[in-house]
Image (cartoon, grey):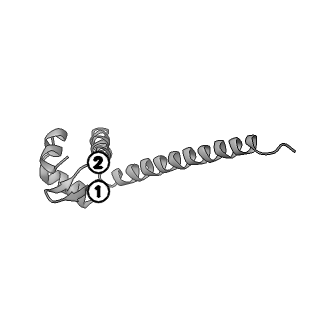
Amino acid sequence: MQTREFVLHMRIDAEELDQWVAAGWLIPGQNEAGRDFSDIDLARAHLIRELQGLGVNEDGIPIVLDLVDQLHGMRRMLRELLSAVKTQRRQEGQGPQE
């Protein structure tokens, strides 16, 4: 999603979007047409809006975003661990019995 479409979808002005990007709250990709926002950027922007609506100040938003990122990272690690355990159990079940 290009900048113009993102701004219209989120109903924010380009200046505010620039501030969010400068603060590192959103990290869009780049292409020949300019910034390219992903679905993850869109979800983060919705979260930022919700946090602002709840009264979280600008100092608190990066803390919450970091905690959300950590949570997602831990969930990914747990899925990978579960997958490895399942693979190990299948391999043990197919090997020779002692």
Give amino acid for label 2: Asp
Q: Where on the picture, by quarter, is residue 85?
A: top right
* Residue at figure coordinates x 17%, y 39% from the top left: 9
Q: Does the CB distance between marks 1 and 2 fall below 8 Å? A: yes
Q: Which mark is residue 83?
A: none
The percent position of residue 48, horizontal first and vertical second, equals 29, 45
Q: Is residue 3 above or below residue 22?
A: above
Foreground residue among 60 and 79: 79
The percent position of residue 1, horizontal first and vertical second, equals 20, 46
Give amino acid for label 1: Ile
Q: Quadrant of the C terminus?
A: top right
Q: Residue furthest right?
A: 98
| Total marks in image | 2
- Tag 1's secondary structure? loop
Q: Is residue 50 above or below residue 63?
A: above
Q: CA distance from mark 1 to mark 2?
A: 7 Å
In the displayed structure image, the side of residue 95 where residue 66 appears, left or right = left
How many residues crowd mark 1 within 10 Å: few (<14), some (14–19), many (20+)?
some
- Tag 2's secondary structure? helix
The percent position of residue 13, horizontal first and vertical second, equals 12, 47
How many residues crowd mark 2 within 10 Å: few (<14), some (14–19), many (20+)?
some
Foreground residue among 82 and 17: 82
Q: Is residue 20 above or below residue 43?
A: below
The percent position of residue 54, horizontal first and vertical second, equals 32, 38
Which residue position holds label 2?
A: 41
Sequence-wise, the earlier of marks 1 and 2 is 1
* Residue at figure coordinates x 30%, y 39% from the top left: 50
Foreground residue among 98 and 40: 98
* Residue at figure coordinates x 19%, y 40% from the top left: 10
Which residue position holds label 1?
A: 27
